[in-house]
Amino acid sequence: MKESIKKWNYWWYNSEKLNKIEWIEREVLKKNIELLNSPHIKDIIGVRRAGKTFLMYQIILELIKQNIKPEEILYLNFDDPEFKEIKKTISNALEIKPQIKYLFLDEIQNIKGWENDIRVYYDRNEFKQIFVSGSSASLISKDIGKKLTGRHITTIVTPISFKEYISKNVLDYNDPFQKENIIHYLEKYMLDGGFPETMIDNVETKKSILVNTYNDVLIRDIISRHNADPTIIKNISYYLMTNIGNPFSENSIAKLLNIHPETVKKYLNILEEAFLFYFVKQFSWKIKTQLKKDIKAYSIDVGLRNAVSFKYSEDLGKLAENIVLTELKRRYEEVFFWKENREVDFVIKEGNDITAINVTYTDEIKEREIKGLIEFKETYKNAKLIIITKDLEQDKEKIKYIPLWKWLLNRKEN
């Protein structure tokens, strides 16, 4: 075990290796650096291979830059079969480096009852900082929620955003002469997505990485963890991946797959917990109305969707819609859609402010996109209206038209 601990913590012996890693500049890193002033446990959660481990390494590098001694920092990855117990593993590490003050515990959901040990370390104030990571939202809702209430701060790591993707390709999006290059990379991003391991040129290798990621999530985070029926969960997931952005109900999927609606409801929750999908409810001031109506599903990443779904052709409009949704989920806690006679893709509510958004990856705007927003505004008089386009930018009839690339690179709707 001690040899494995040493291998994972190579900065004890050569911290310069961290500087040689090619990093992608991420927003979540800034947040976690700010959180170093807080004594709370930091839990980092998100879909597999989205960059949680690299985020931990980047935080470790930042600590070393802040003159924390490398031997005070311990990283353990509990995917390693050598590490079967938290206390025993940390005890072995302390025998090697007794001055450890910073804990980074990766894929911690693999250890049953982990939250009890972490609570003891926290309550005894044995370490200055404790970071834990996992590939399941139950890290919050079940494990942490019961034992560590009031003791933790959560960071959700998603596949990289388009803004981060642009920074990887060293483009200045404020330079008007770079617009064509930015659109080129946007359409590449719409096909490849934002999983860090896909930032390579070999198309077949990208697809293989994404398919393997998808299967890992289904097998390790869903089927094994929840004892889910493999055939049912794969069929539901495949259906959702193939029908992103299309309204559906639990009953409609149950009828299609010849299973009970309660089974569908259970598995939808598990798929969301494993970060494969975002589910969007219909907008209403009444919670009961939201629960009764159809919902829509979007993939956590368009590249993942493209790799595993059945597609007759590339539908850039649907991919653009999915990308807008994932960006909205980075910016806001709640995102809705609206449907009466016509439909609005997304509705954002901040206090008393409401913004309605339609997405169409074209500059030839169809009447239904405009009329859907106008119908929405007849009910919600103070709503802001936005149509996200390919490259059309204008203000017309109280609707703001914004190119997708520009909207993605701005922090808030305006």
Image (spheres, helix red, strand yellow):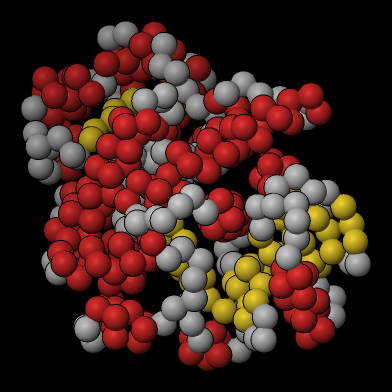
Q: Which residue occupies the extreme front position in the image?
A: 312
Horizontal and vertical percent position of residue 345? 63, 68
Q: Relative to 22, is 218 on the left or the right?
A: left
Residue plotted at (64% across, 67% down): 346
Q: Relative to 161, is 208 on the left or the right?
A: left
State the image quarter where residue 54 is shown: top left
Relative to 347, residue 24 above or below: above
State the image quarter where residue 250 is shown: bottom left
Q: Quadrant of the N terminus?
A: top left
Q: Relative to 149, is 183 on the left or the right?
A: right
In the depicted view, which residue is nearer to us: 42 or 292? 292
Relative to 232, residue 6 above or below: above
Horizontal and vertical percent position of residue 208? 27, 37
In the depicted view, which residue is nearer to us: 400 or 31? 400
In the depicted view, which residue is nearer to us: 147 or 140? 140
Residue plotted at (51% across, 20% down): 66
State the image quarter where residue 348 is shown: bottom right
Relative to 337, residue 164 above or below: above
Horizontal and vertical percent position of residue 260? 23, 86
Q: Quadrant of the C terminus?
A: bottom right
**Circle count:** 0
Residue plotted at (45% across, 39% down): 192
Q: Relative to 92, is 151 on the left or the right?
A: right
Residue plotted at (71% across, 72% down): 368
The answer to whether residue 291 is seen in the rendering is yes
Horizontal and vertical percent position of residue 83? 12, 37
The answer to whether residue 44 is seen in the rendering is no
